[in-house]
Amino acid sequence: MIDTDEKHHVVTINVNGVRHTASVEARKLLVHLLRDDFGLTGTHVGCDTSQCGACTVDIDGQAVKSCTVLAVMADGSSITTIEGLAPGGGALHPVQAAFHEHHALQCGFCTPGMIMAVRQLHAQNPDPTESEIRHGLAGNICRCTGYTNIIRAVQSLASEGHRHD
Amino acid sequence: MIPASFDYIRATSLAHAIGLLQTDPDGSKLVAGGHTLIPTLKLRLASPALLIDIGGISELKGIEVADRVRIGALTTHAELLASEPLRKLLPIFYQAADLIADPQVRNRGTIGGSLANADPAADWPAVSIALHAELELAGPAGRRHVAAKDFFVDIMTTALGHDEVLVAIHIPYPNTGAQFRYRKIRHPASGYAVVGVAVALRLQDGLVSEAAIGITGATGRAFAADSASAHLNGKPLSSQNIANAALLACEQAECLSDGYASADYRKHLLRTEIIRALTSLTNA
């Protein structure tokens, strides 16, 4: 349903290749639009203060914390969420496969955001050192793993020569 | 956390943004990257009636490196980190950007937002002071330039009028032999500078000239450590001269105190970081 009173703004956003139109209050956060209106609950709300990175999505090619973007500001953009990486339950994206292979998660709460951040890190630096991985994932917090297997997973992407797209 | 209600308009031009600001200067806020403002709205520390989104105004974008350097206010930290021409000419932009927050935040946060917000612990104010930057402001009466060292008035208070927009940062082309260093002690949770030091100087025949030091984090506003710079000029960059300059900068600083760092501890960090920053240039 599209609300059209003066407090609402109509936004059109391409999410995972699908065009969505919604009517939002200006104060609505992008992460809530994705989860509550579009049903894409793979993007998580962790800290809600732009620290933890669980809400990371790709907006126009850049990893961004969607708890710190207004939905109305994303009007006209193209967004990829974790659901867009392996559409229709198909083969896992290489980053997802690497996380699976190296058990780079325990509870899994941070994993969608972590994978979206790794996707950008790998695109910018396909063969990072451990230090570069830690620096590149500074915006994502995992409270379970100690990061060791996450780093192994990212390093495996380089050694196996996966494509990042 | 949900912000209080507000209205939202995308400004289509600088004149449009200024016109909207004039209508309700106290009730309006400019937004670009939003990575300071949106958390502030979520905590309801601010409740503007209107957000004016300046993110689409092309005049406020881009990095130009020519006979002087112009950085549009909308330039993100990530763009400053990635700019090869800038890294070659003024590597302090790379050094500082790499220490700001994290990659996702750097993708959205802008240098103009950082300067205009004037958080006392933000990085770009110190860098802009050390580089003798001029900030270009546009308002109803036209354009004006304000030197960075005069722009920061107090905690989160600048020379920017309520109906003005920060357009760009202009930096004089550095002279041959100019060297730069940005260092900071990062707050472990926020990533902001507990103390941040930006240094620019030239070394010719073993003597310092054109020294400029910008300090952030230590006090309520970023400032130019003029007595320290003056002390260095004309002298060798010896450990004794460096130590004296650091002490002079500390004498100038009325340090902040908070739960993380007392004023005395901040002063100690300030002295230490100035010494480290200057020492790193002695062998460069």
Image (cartoon, grey):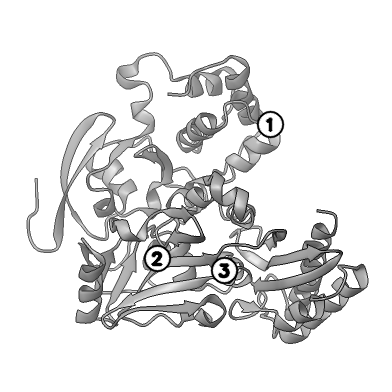
Residue B86 horizontal/vertical position (percent):
56, 51
Helix, strand or loop status at disc 2: helix
Instruction: Name the subunit of mark 3.
Output: B
Q: Residue flagged by tag 2: what amino acid is it?
A: Leu
- Badge 3 amino acid: Ser
Q: Using the image, tell me which numbered label, if any, was put on residue B194.
A: none
Q: Quadrant of residue A145?
A: top right
A138 lies above or below A26: above
Residue linked to disc 2 = B37
Q: Chain of mark 2?
A: B
Disc on res. B128: 3
Mark-to-mark CA distance, 1 and 2: 34 Å
Q: Is residue B144 above or below residue B53?
A: below
Q: Quadrant of residue A7?
A: bottom left
Quarter containing the N terminus of chain B = bottom left
Q: Which residue is pictured at 57% across the width and 68% down the height?
A: B128
